[in-house]
Image (cartoon, helix red, strand yellow):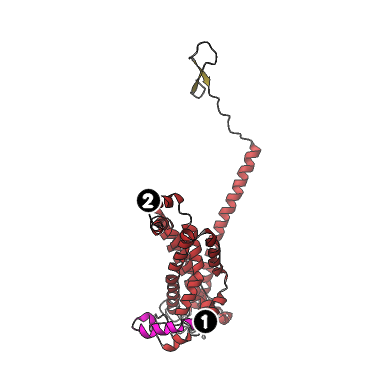
C-alpha cells in the first residue's frame, strides 16, 4: 500500500518461498517544478503572444468600424441636400447645383448586382471543375504547374483585363452576341439595340471578363478544401467499387461543399468591388440598363472612379461617398451570409 492507496505486487526474487509475492510501493510522482523564474518566462511569453493576437483582431474590427463611421459622416451632408429618394431614384446623377442635388443608387445597384451574379454563374462551374481535376484526376506532375498557372490569373492588373476585354475579347464575341440578340430577343436577357451589341462594351463582355478575374479566387479556396478530404474515406469508397466520380460525389463534395460556397462568396465580394476593368468596358455603351446582357451602365465602383474629378467639393464627393457606403454595406452583407451558410452547414 502506498501513500496514495496503490500497491503493486512483484514476485519474491529469492529462491526461498518461491511463488510468494511481496508488496512494492509505487513511487510517488515528483511534483511539477514551480521554479518562479522559469514559470514567469513562460507565462510572460504566453501573455505577449495572446495580447498581440487579440490586438490584431481588435485592430481589424476598429478599422472596419472607422471606415463605416467615415463614410456615414461624409455622406450625411450630401444626403441632406438630395431632393430625390436615394434608394429608389434611378435617373440622371445631377450634382452640379449643390444646394439642390438629384442622385440615387437604384441603377448602380442593379448593374452591380447583375454583372456580378452573371460573372459568378460563369465562374463557379469552371472553378469547380478545375479544383476537382487538380485534386482528384490530374497526375501530380501536372497538378502543380496547372494550379500555378490558374493562380497567376490573380496577378494580372485590372486595367490589363479591361483593355483585353474591350479590344480583344469583345470583337471575338461579337458574332455570338449578335446571334443571341437576333435569335433570342424574345428573352429580356438578350433584348437590346444592335448598335450596343456591336460596340462590345456591354455587361455580356464585362461579365465574362469579371468571371475570369474571380476564377482564381474560387479555384484556390476550393482546391485547398477538396484536397483536405480524409484519405481513408476516399480509399474506403474505392474499395467498395465506387467510380472516381462517385468518390467525388459521396466523399469530396460533402466534405468540401462549405469551402466551395465560401470561396464563391469571396469571389462575389471581389466582383462587387471591381473598378477599372468594368469602367473601361462599360463606359463606352450609352444604352441605359434594362436587365439585358447587352446593356451598359455603371457599377458603384466604376461610377465613383469615373467622376473622381468632382471630389473637390465636399457635397459632390459626399454623394459618391454615399454610394460607396451602400457598396460597403452590400459587401459586408454578402460576406456575412457566406459565413452564416458555412457555419450552418458545419453545424449539420
Is residue 348 rendered to the left or right of residue 135?
A: left
- Helix or strand or loop: what does disc 1 sit on? helix
Magenta highlight: main SS: helix
Would you call the spot at circle 2 few (<14 residues within 10 Å), some (14-19), or many (20 or more)? Answer: few
Is 282 magenta? The answer is no
User: What span is in magenta?
Assistant: 169-191
Asked whether 182 or 102 is in front, the reply is 182
Q: Which mark is residue 176?
A: none
* Residue at the (53%, 62%) spot, across then down: 142
Q: Position of residue 297 (x, y in %)?
A: 46, 81
Is there CB contact under 8 Å for labels 2 and 1? Answer: no
Number of numbered callouts drawn: 2
Q: Which mark is residue 240?
A: 2
Above or below, comparing residue 282 to residue 56 in the picture: below
| Residue 150 appears in view | yes
Q: Which residue is mark 1?
A: 166
Asked whether 218 or 226 is in front, the reply is 226
Residue placed farthest to the left in the image? 186
> Mark 2 or mark 1: which comes first in sequence?
1
Q: Quadrant of residue 255?
A: bottom left
Above or below, comparing residue 325 to residue 282 in the picture: above
Which one is closest to the eye, mark 2 or mark 1?
Answer: 2
Asked whether 57 or 276 is in front, the reply is 276
- Helix or strand or loop: what does disc 2 sit on? loop
Asked whether 296 or 34 is in front, the reply is 296
Is residue 95 rendered to the left or right of residue 193?
A: right
Amino acid at each position: 500500500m502506498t501513500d496514495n492507496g496503490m500497491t503493486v505486487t512483484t514476485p519474491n526474487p529469492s529462491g526461498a518461498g518461491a511463488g510468494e509475492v511481496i508488496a512494492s510501493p509505487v513511487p510517488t510522482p515528483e511534483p511539477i517544478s514551480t521554479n518562479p523564474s522559469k514559470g514567469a518566462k513562460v507565462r510572460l511569453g504566453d501573455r505577449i503572444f495572446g495580447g498581440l493576437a487579440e490586438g490584431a483582431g481588435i485592430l481589424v474590427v476598429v478599422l472596419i468600424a472607422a471606415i463605416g463611421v467615415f463614410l456615414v459622416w461624409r455622406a450625411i451632408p450630401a444626403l441632406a441636400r438630395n431632393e430625390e429618394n436615394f434608394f429608389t431614384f434611378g435617373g440622371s446623377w445631377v450634382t452640379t447645383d449643390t444646394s439642390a442635388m438629384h442622385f440615387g443608387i437604384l441603377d448602380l445597384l442593379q448593374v452591380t448586382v447583375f454583372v456580378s451574379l452573371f460573372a459568378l454563374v460563369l465562374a463557379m462551374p469552371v472553378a469547380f471543375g478545375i479544383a476537382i481535376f487538380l485534386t482528384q484526376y490530374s497526375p501530380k506532375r501536372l497538378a502543380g504547374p496547372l494550379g500555378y498557372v490558374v493562380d497567376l490569373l490573380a496577378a494580372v492588373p485590372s486595367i490589363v483585363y479591361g483593355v483585353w476585354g474591350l479590344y480583344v475579347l469583345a470583337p471575338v464575341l461579337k458574332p455570338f452576341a449578335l446571334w443571341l440578340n437576333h435569335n433570342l430577343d424574345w428573352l429580356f436577357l438578350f433584348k437590346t439595340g444592335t448598335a450596343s451589341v456591336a460596340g462590345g462594351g456591354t455587361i455580356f463582355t464585362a461579365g465574362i471578363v469579371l468571371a475570369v478575374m474571380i476564377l482564381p479566387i474560387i479555384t484556390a479556396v476550393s482546391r485547398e478544401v477538396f484536397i483536405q478530404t480524409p484519405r481513408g474515406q476516399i480509399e474506403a469508397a474505392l474499395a467498395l467499387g465506387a467510380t472516381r466520380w462517385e468518390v467525388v460525389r459521396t466523399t469530396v463534395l460533402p466534405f468540401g461543399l462549405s469551402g466551395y460556397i465560401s470561396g464563391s462568396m469571396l469571389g462575389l465580394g471581389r466582383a462587387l468591388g471591381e473598378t477599372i476593368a468594368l469602367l473601361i468596358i462599360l463606359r463606352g455603351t450609352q444604352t441605359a440598363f434594362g436587365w439585358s446582357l447587352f446593356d451598359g451602365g455603371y457599377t458603384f465602383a466604376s461610377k465613383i472612379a469615373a467622376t473622381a474629378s468632382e471630389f473637390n467639393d465636399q457635397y459632390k464627393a459626399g454623394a459618391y461617398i454615399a454610394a460607396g457606403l451602400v457598396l460597403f454595406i452590400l459587401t459586408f452583407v454578402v460576406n456575412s451570409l457566406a459565413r452564416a451558410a458555412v457555419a450552418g452547414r458545419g453545424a449539420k
